[in-house]
Amino acid sequence: MHPLSTALFLLGYGLALPIGARLPMIVANRNRLALWGHQVGVIIAAGGWLVRGRIVMALLHVVWLFVANAWFGLEPRRRHRAAER
């Protein structure tokens, strides 16, 4: 294992996982700062996978960034539509 990838994993996952565990609450409360913290952590962890040469794993992390961002962006619309009914 590459020492730089290990450092990136520790830093990235150390930031992303605790925030990610509370992601439904973060999305419901519209806490953009916490979402950004989660995304920075995932980007750092993806960098660790790139250093290791695991491009597919890095791409999966990037896909998760888009999914989390879309979830954050679509949540108020769903709540607004439910309130209209």
Image (tube, rainbow, N blue to C red):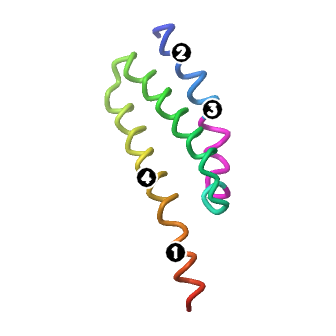
Residue 2 pos. (x, y %): 46, 9
Q: Where does label 1 land, which residue?
A: 78
Secondary structure of residue under mark 3: helix
Q: Is residue 84 left or right of residue 22?
A: left
Indicate the amino acid at tag 3.
Leu
Indicate the amino acid at tag 4.
Val
Q: Is 73 placed above or below 17 here?
A: below
Identify the magenta region: 16-25
Judged from this view, the residue extending furthest toward the top is: 3
Q: Quadrant of the C terminus?
A: bottom right
Residue 43 pos. (x, y %): 46, 32
How far apart are the two marked residues, 1 and 2, measured between alpha carbons?
Answer: 39 Å
Q: Where does label 4 land, which residue?
A: 67
User: Dot 3, how many residues are within 10 Å of its Cα: few (below 14), some (14-19), or many (20+)?
Assistant: some
Q: Where does label 3 land, which residue?
A: 15
**Among the two numbered marks 2 and 4 on one chain, the one whose residue lies closer to the N terminus:** 2
**Among the two numbered marks 3 and 4 on one chain, the one whose residue lies closer to the N terminus:** 3
Per the rendering, the mark at residue 6 is: 2
Residue 19 on the magenta segment: yes
User: Dot 2, how many residues are within 10 Å of its Cα: few (below 14), some (14-19), or many (20+)?
Assistant: some
Residue at image point 60% right, 85% down: 83
How far apart are the two marked residues, 2 and 4, measured between alpha carbons?
Answer: 25 Å
**Among the two numbered marks 2 and 3 on one chain, the one whose residue lies closer to the N terminus:** 2
Judged from this view, the residue extending furthest toward the front is: 33
How far apart are the two marked residues, 2 and 3, measured between alpha carbons?
Answer: 14 Å
The residue nearer to you, when weighing 32 against 44, is: 32
User: Dot 4, how many residues are within 10 Å of its Cα: few (below 14), some (14-19), or many (20+)?
Assistant: few
Secondary structure of residue under mark 4: helix
